[in-house]
Amino acid sequence: MYQPNMIRNVAMISHGGAGKTTLTEAMLFNAKAVDRLGRVDNGSSAMDYEPDEVKRKISVNLSLGYGEWKKTKVNILDTPGYTDFVGEVQKSLRVVEGCVVVLDAAPGVETGTELVWQYADERKLARCIFANKMEKEHADFYKAVESISILESSANIIPFQLPIGTGDKFSGIVDLIRMKAYEYKDGKAQERPMPQDISERIEKYREKLIDAAAESDDALTEKYLETMELSEQEIISGLNNGIKNGTIIPILCGSAYNNIGVDRLLDLIVESFPSPADVGVVCGVNPDETRTVSLDDPFCGLVFKIISDPHIGELVFFRAYSGSLTNGMDIINATTGHKERIGHLCLMSGKHKNNIERVGAGDIGAIVKIKGVKIGATLCMTSNPITLPGIDFPQPSISIAVRPKTKADQEKMGLGLHKIADEDPTFTMHLDHELSQTIISGIGETHLDVVVDRLTRRFGTEVELEKPRVPYRETIRKPGQGSYKHKKQSGGRGQYGEAFLKIEPLTTGERFEFVSDIFGGAIPAKYVPPVEKGVRDTMDKGILAGCHIINVRVTLYDGSFHDVDSSDLAFQIAGAGAFKKAFEDANPVLLEPIVEVECLAPEANMGEVIGDLNVRRGRILGVEPQGKNELVKANVPQSEMYKYATALRSITRGRGSFKMKFAHYEEVPHPIAEKIIAEAKVAREEEHHA
C-alpha cells in the first residue's frame, strides 16, 4: 500500500484518434506493468479489450491501468475521445488530480480537445500537453503549439521539449530544462549532441521557460530580475510549483507508437503533478464534513465506474479519499444508507484483476460482488459518515425506440437496459405507456449503437430499432353537438341508452371538463357517470389519428332510457357514440408538441444553425451572446427534432450543444396533419386485420 504522496492519478484526454490508448500502453510498458506494447489497430491493446472497442478500433469505455515509476504508483485512466462517450471522461476527471491532453501533432487542437480542456478547467486540474504522432508524415510540432492558442486559458502554456526531426526522421527530443538532447532507439533514450539546426528555437523557448519559472514564485522573480539567472534546481522548483497550481502547462512531444518521449512524460507526472496528499482535505456536501487525505483518517471513497460482468457479477470501481478499505470491513453507502460488507478487493489493469487485501487513501481500487451501489455514491465508515460531491453528467440528446424481436427477448431486454443504465449515467431508458414504446436515449448515434451491441452480446437480447412516435393530441376549434342511441334486442333483456352531448373548446389549458345538465329525469343520475366514462375512453383512444383528445368541455343535456333494458354499459356506449358525432361536428384538429430549444454554438456557425432550425419549422425567439458562442432560443415541433444532435454536431463540427423541454401544443399544418391521419388509419386497419 502506497502513501498518498507516492501516488499519481492521471486521466488521458483528447479528441478521438489522437493516440491516448497507444500512449497509455507505452506508459504501462515503460513502467513494466505489461510485457508488450499493445496495438489498437490489431486488437492487442490491454486497455481497449471490450469486443465493441476491438471491433470499432476506438475507446468507448474508461479503462484503468497502473504501474510504478521511480517508486511512485501511477494510476492511468484512459478515456474515450469521441463525444458520444463524454460521460466516461467526466467519470475519470472526478477522481484524478492531473491529466495529459494528447494532441495529434498533424492537426493540433481539434474540436474534442476544446471540449475536454473545458472539462479539465472546470475541475481546476493540473495538466500537460503531449504532442503525439510526431512520426507521422504531416506532423508539425510548431504548428500544433500555435493551435493551442485557441484554448481559453490564463495559464502559461509553454514547450518543455522540442522535437529532433519530424515525420519518419523524428528520432528524439531536446530537454529545455536540463538543456540536453536525447535520441531514442527501441524506446531507450541516449544522450546526443544538441542539434544545431534548431539552435535558435532552443534559445527562444529556453528563455520563455526561465521566464515562466521565475514568474511562478515571488522570490524567484526577484532573483531573476537582479541576476538574470536561475539555477537548474530553481527552474525545476519554479516550474513544478506552476504546474501544481495550474499557472504553467507544459508541452511535451513524442511518439507513443515508437515509444519516444514516453519516459519523459512519466518523469513529469511523477516529479511535477500533484499527488492526492497535495489536495490535503476533501469536503463533503455538508460544510462540516471533511476528511484529510491520509491513511490515518476514517475511510471514505467515491464510486465512479461500474461494470456488470456476467461471470463475476458487478465490479465497482472507487477512489479512496481517506483512510483505507480492507477485505471483511463493514461500510455504509452514505447515498442510500445501506450497510455493506467488503468481501473481495482488487486492482484492475485493463481486464486483468489483481486481488489485494487493502486500498489506501489516494489510490483507486475495485470491489467485486457488491450490490445496490450507483455511480457517484459515497462509501464510508458507519461510525464516521460523510457524503462526497457526486459526478455531473451531460444529459442525453438523442432518442430512439427499441422493441424485442421475440417474446423471449422482452424480459431480457428490460433487465439488460437497466444494467447498462446503471453503468452509464449518460444513457437512459423508459417505457412510454401512452405510445407503447421503450425509448432509449444517449449522447449520440454511436453511443446508442454500442448499447444495442451490448444488449445482444452480454444479455443475449435481439432488438429492432424504430423512430420514436410523437405524442400528438386532438382537439376542437368550435362548439359542436351530437347524439347517439344504443339499442339492441336479441332475445331476453335488451340494451338501451341514448345521450345528447354538446362540446366546446377549452382555452384554459385544462384537458377535460364534464358537465351534467340533465333535468326532468330524462336520464337517471346513476347513468351520468357511465356516459362520462364512455366519453373519457373515447378521448383516450382518439378519433382523428388515435391520439389523446384534450381541452374539451362536454355537456350532457338530454337523453332517454328504458326501465328494463338500460344499463351502465348501454349508456357508456351511448356516451362514446354521441361524443364521436359531436367531435366531428366541432372542426376537429390535430395538435403537435412544441419544444423550447436552447442551442449553444460558435458565432461563425450561427447562420447555418438558424437556417437549419427554420427548415425544421422552428420559430426563432432570440439570440444572445455567450462568450465565444451564441445561444439561440427557438420553438420547434418535436417531430422535427429527431436526430437533431447528429445534425448540430455536423454543422458545428462538434462544437454545438443543445437542450430542449416541452413548451406547449400547436395545431399541425393541414398537409402534414392529413398525412399523419392517413398513416394512422392504415396502421389501425393493419392492426385490425392482424
Image: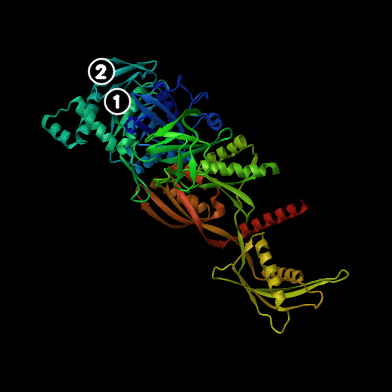
Q: Is residue 437 left or right of residue 494?
A: left
**Residue 413 falls in image quadrant:** top right
Q: Residue furthest left?
A: 226
Crowdedness near tag 1: few (<14), some (14–19) or many (≥20) residues, C-alpha within 10 Å:
many
Residue at the image point whose x is 67% and y is 69% from the top: 583
Q: Is residue 192 shown above or below 311?
A: above
Q: Tell me where residue 548 appears, x and y as whole percent.
A: 63, 62
Q: Is residue 649 shown above or below 5?
A: below
User: Is residue 156 in view?
Assistant: no
Numbered mark located on residue 161 in the image: 1
Residue at the image point whose x is 62% and y is 59% from the top: 673
Q: Tell me where residue 141 appears, x and y as whole percent.
A: 34, 27
Q: Is residue 582 left or right of residue 319?
A: right
Residue at the image point whose x is 52% and y is 52% from the top: 615
Measured in 3D between alpha carbons, the distance from the residue under mark 1 to the one under mark 2, in whole angstroms, is 15 Å
Q: Is residue 677 shown above or below 238?
A: below
Foreground pick, 651 / 255 = 255
Numbered mark located on residue 196 in the image: 2
Q: Amino acid at mark 2?
A: Gln
Q: Amino acid at mark 1?
A: Gln
Label 1 SS: strand
**Which mark is in front, 1 or 2?**
1
Tell me which label, 1 or 2, sits earlier in the chain. Answer: 1
Q: Is residue 63 left or right of residue 183?
A: right
